[in-house]
Image (cartoon, grey):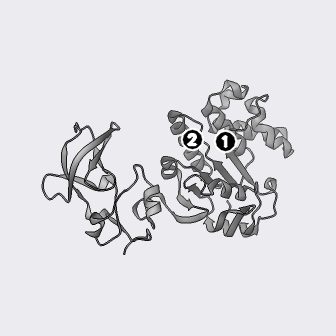
Amino acid sequence: MVDIVLKAVRKSFGSVEVIKGIDLEIRQGEFMVFVGPSGCGKSTLLRLIAGLEAITSGDLLFDADRMNNVIPSKRGVAMVFQSYALYPHMNVYDNMAFGMKLAKSSKAEMDTRIRKAAEMLQIDHLLDRLPKQLSGGQRQRVAIGRAIVRDPRVFLFDEPLSNLDAALRVATRLEIAKLHHDMKDVTMIYVTHDQVEAMTLADRICVLRDGRVEQVGTPAELYDSPNSIFVAGFIGSPKMNFLKGAFAEAYDCDTLGIRSEHIDIVDEGAVWSGEVVHVEDLGSDHFLFVNVGAEEPLIVRRKGKHEVPLGTKLGVAPQPEHLHRFDSAGKPVS
C-alpha cells in the first residue's frame, strides 16, 4: 500500500497554470475519486501522479519518498485510460502479458498472474480473442487486467467508463468496486465527471475547481455538508435547488439551498406554492418542477408512481433541518 502526498503541487503549460498549488493526502489502500467540471485539472493531476507529466513546482511523495524525478516505470503505478489502448494485432493474453514481458517476468509467473486476473474479471474465456472480437465492456476489462498483472502499488483510472453505454457502465462499475474490495493493498485514484460513479465507488471524493481543491470528504460529507455553493451544486443529481432574493432573505442568507428529497408537498402550512411545469418520471421516483416564482423551477422528488398533470397547483415546505444557507461569497452561513 502507498500513502500519496501532494505538497503545493503546481503545473504550468507555458504561461498557462493548470494546477495551482494542490495539497492533498491520499491514504494507503484508499479509493480516491477526483471530480470537477471540464478543464478543472483532474486528468492533469492524475498524469502528474503517474509521471506522464512533469511537476512544475511542489512535491509528490509515495510513502515519504519524493517521486518528482522518478520515471513512470519505477513508480509502481498502473494506469487505465478511457480509450482502452489495446494492441489490435495481439490477442487478450498477449495484451495482458505485454508489460510483464517488458519487465522480463518469467513465463510461469506471467501465466499465473494473467489467468488469475482474467478469472477475477471474468474474461478467462476470452484470452485467445483479438480486441476487435470484444465488446466495449470486455475491452475495458482487458485494459484493467493488463494493469492488474503488473502488481501495482497505485492504480490510476482516467474516466475508464466514459466510452461505454449505460448498461455496460453499470456492469463495469460493479467490476471496479469488486476489484477495490479484492485488492485492499492497492491505492486507487479515479477520475470521472459522472456523479454516480463518484458517489458509489469512492472512499473519499476530491472536488477540483479551476486547478485547486475545493473540498475533500466522503460522499456523504460532500452531499450533506458542502463547504461551498460550488460543491453543493456539483455533487448530487439532480443538483441542489438554489433560491435567491426574498426566498433567501427570509432565512437571513444570500442563497438558500435545499435538495429535492428534502421538500415536502403539503396541503396546509405551505412555505412556497406554485404550479407544476414539468415532470420527469424515472419509474421509482418522480421529479416535479414547480414554478414558485424563483429564477428556476423548484425540483421536488416524490417516491413511487404519481400522476401529476402539468399545471397542478402545489404547496411545498422545505425540511428545516436540511436547509443550506450561503453568503454572497458562496460559503455556508453558520
User: Is residue 249 depicted above or below 319 in this figure?
Assistant: below
Residue 283 falls in which quadrant of the image? Answer: top left
Question: In front: 330, or 71?
Answer: 330
Q: Position of residue 253 (x, y in %)?
A: 33, 71
Q: Residue furthest bottom?
A: 334
Q: Amino acid at mark 1?
A: Ile
Is the C terminus in the top left, top right, bottom left or bottom right quadrant?
Answer: bottom left
Residue 12 falls in which quadrant of the image? Answer: bottom right
The answer to whether marks 2 and 1 mark residues whose Cβ atoms lie closer than 8 Å is yes
User: Is residue 184 depicted above or below 144 in this figure?
Assistant: below
Q: Position of residue 13 (x, y in %)?
A: 73, 59
- State the CA–CA distance, disc 2 to disc 1: 10 Å
Question: In front: 207, or 135?
Answer: 207
Residue 120 falls in which quadrant of the image? Answer: top right
Q: Residue furthest left?
A: 268
Question: In front: 120, or 224?
Answer: 224
Which mark is drawn over residue 144? Answer: 1
* Crowd tier of the residue under label 1, counting other residues whose Cα lies within 10 Å: few below 14, some 14–19, many 20 or above: many
Tell which circle, 2 or 1, labels the residue nearer the N-terminal end.
1
Q: Residue at x 68, y 36 (%)?
A: 142
Q: Residue at x 67, y 42 (%)?
A: 144
Question: In front: 170, or 83?
Answer: 83
Give SS at disc 2. Answer: helix
Q: Residue at x 13, y 52 (%)?
A: 267
* Crowd tier of the residue under label 2, counting other residues whose Cα lies within 10 Å: few below 14, some 14–19, many 20 or above: some
Q: Position of residue 111 (x, y in %)?
A: 77, 37
Mark 2 lies on residue: 175
Is the N terminus in the top left, top right, bottom left or bottom right quadrant?
Answer: bottom right
Give SS at disc 1. Answer: helix
Q: Amino acid at mark 2?
A: Glu
Which mark is drawn over residue 164? Answer: none
Q: Residue furthest right?
A: 104
